[in-house]
């Protein structure tokens, strides 16, 4: 950015600089994935020195954790805002989950530890925020299922949406001309299960 | 390894060295994930010089592609060998898929491009092998579903098993004391769908 390369160092109020650094981190994440994160590059982009960035973050792990926190908070908001959740319908939440990952593929990969697995596994804030997003999912299920079945059902839905989101953002299959319709069709199967030609419908 | 550090360079027949290099690559993958792959370290471990390794592989991408090829071939074998596939039952194939990922977490992450996304996206061999594993899954479904429903159903099952496998190998949830039973319970939902308390069972 021109400020860093051609002009004097940029000046920020305390909170503004922290936010500017995180914003630059998100741009880097979406440009090159979690491995593209670098404090020097983040600082360069907002026009401050690396030491100025270290004033706000103890290191790259700390920035990564802060970015993942933003991600989980935004994901929980999206799930909560998904329409028609009142009757225990699950497809809108599933669509919202996958849309979040497709809108923020670099951030989504980071949230699940790519490149920072060690740092995240030990971080209580990440664990708490991940649980919080998961609770939104379970809340939706509680309107539909008896308490004893919610755990397995939530893991089923999370696996399905996590897997589909990653296959899509990793370009593992050709989503055709209408990816949203494909996602909706796949999610629909979570409610009715795969049809079977056998007599016994429990013959999975 | 002692040969490299204390003894004379190891001597291999042509094919043996290639296999030894790949074997060392797999050990590295499982020790530190895709980012731990390094030609120098692979060569060091089998007790040859880096140039000797370059005689077999044009670079790190080439080794990564060869390792992923091994992975997809082994995954397809495991799916084909899954018991009880004759009646279109899906749980055994799903269990086999997830067991493969849990047995080879570093390799599994590599197969889906972690760290080598660019190299893999452009590689026809990877694409062909991935398709081949996918065809095994579709074959199982063809005994159960009309042709027009197989595509969506296969993507549904692949998403579910891919997501569950990654959540497990990434340690994203506590699988409790009997992970196999949990996997089986989650896969069972793919056949019957999530129960609903609402009247309309299509109310996903």
Image (cartoon, coloured by chain):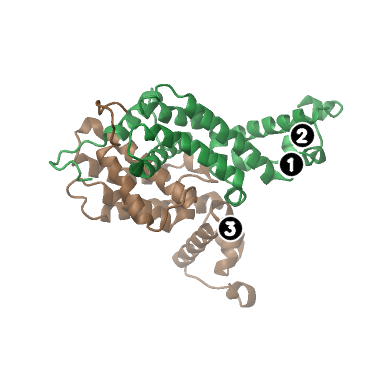
Chain colours: A green, B brown
Q: Is residue A59 visible?
A: yes
Location of residue A98 with respect to B100 vertically, above or below: above
Provide the chain ID for the residue under circle 1.
A
* Secondary element type, mark 1: loop
Provide the chain ID for the residue under circle 3.
B
Return the x and y of residue A38 as percentages of the image width and height: 70, 41
Question: Residue B161: which numbered mark, if any?
Answer: none
Image quarter where the N terminus of chain B lies is bottom right
Q: CA distance from mark 2 to mark 3?
A: 32 Å
Location of residue A36 with respect to B165 vertically, above or below: above
Looking at this view, is B80 or B122 the one in front?
B80
Q: Are marks 1 and 3 in contact (CB under 8 Å)?
A: no
Return the x and y of residue A142 as percentages of the image width and height: 38, 35
Q: Are marks 1 and 2 in contact (CB under 8 Å)?
A: no
Looking at this view, is B121 or A122 the one in front?
A122
User: Callout 2: 10 Å neighbours few (<14), some, many (20+)?
Assistant: many
Looking at this view, is A200 or A60 the one in front?
A200
Looking at this view, is A79 or B155 the one in front?
A79
User: Callout 3: 10 Å neighbours few (<14), some, many (20+)?
Assistant: many
Camera-side mark, 1 or 2: 1
Image quarter where the C terminus of chain B lies is top left
Asked whether the residues under marks 1 and 2 belong to the same chain, the reply is yes
Point out the residue furthest to the bottom here.
B7
Q: Are marks 2 and 3 in contact (CB under 8 Å)?
A: no
Camera-side mark, 2 or 3: 2
Provide the chain ID for the residue under circle 2.
A
Question: Residue A57: which numbered mark, if any?
Answer: 1
Q: Which residue is mark 2?
A: A44
Q: CA distance from mark 1 to mark 2?
A: 15 Å
Q: CA distance from mark 1 to mark 3?
A: 34 Å
Q: Which residue is mark 3?
A: B39
């Amino acid at each position: 950015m021109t400020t860093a390369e051609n002009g004097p160092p940029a000046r920020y109020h305390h909170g503004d600089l922290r936010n500017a650094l995180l914003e630059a981190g998100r741009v880097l994440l979406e440009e090159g994935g979690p491995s593209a994160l670098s404090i020097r590059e983040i600082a360069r982009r907002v026009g401050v020195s690396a030491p100025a960035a270290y004033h706000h973050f103890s290191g790259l792990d700390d920035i990564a954790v802060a970015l993942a926190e933003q991600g989980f908070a935004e994901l929980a908001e999206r799930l909560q805002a998904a329409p028609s959740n009142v009757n225990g319908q699950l497809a809108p939440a599933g669509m919202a989950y996958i849309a979040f990952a497709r809108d923020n593929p670099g951030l989504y990969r980071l949230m699940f530890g790519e490149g920072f697995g060690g740092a995240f596994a030990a971080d209580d804030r990440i664990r708490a925020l991940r649980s919080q997003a998961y609770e939104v999912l379970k809340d939706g299920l509680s309107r539909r299922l008896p308490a004893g079945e919610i755990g397995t059902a939530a893991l089923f839905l999370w696996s399905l949406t996590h897997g589909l989101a990653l296959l899509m953002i990793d370009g593992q299959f050709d989503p055709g001309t209408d990816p949203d319709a494909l996602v909706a069709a796949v999610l629909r199967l979570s409610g009715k299960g795969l049809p079977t030609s056998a007599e016994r419908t429990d013959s999975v």
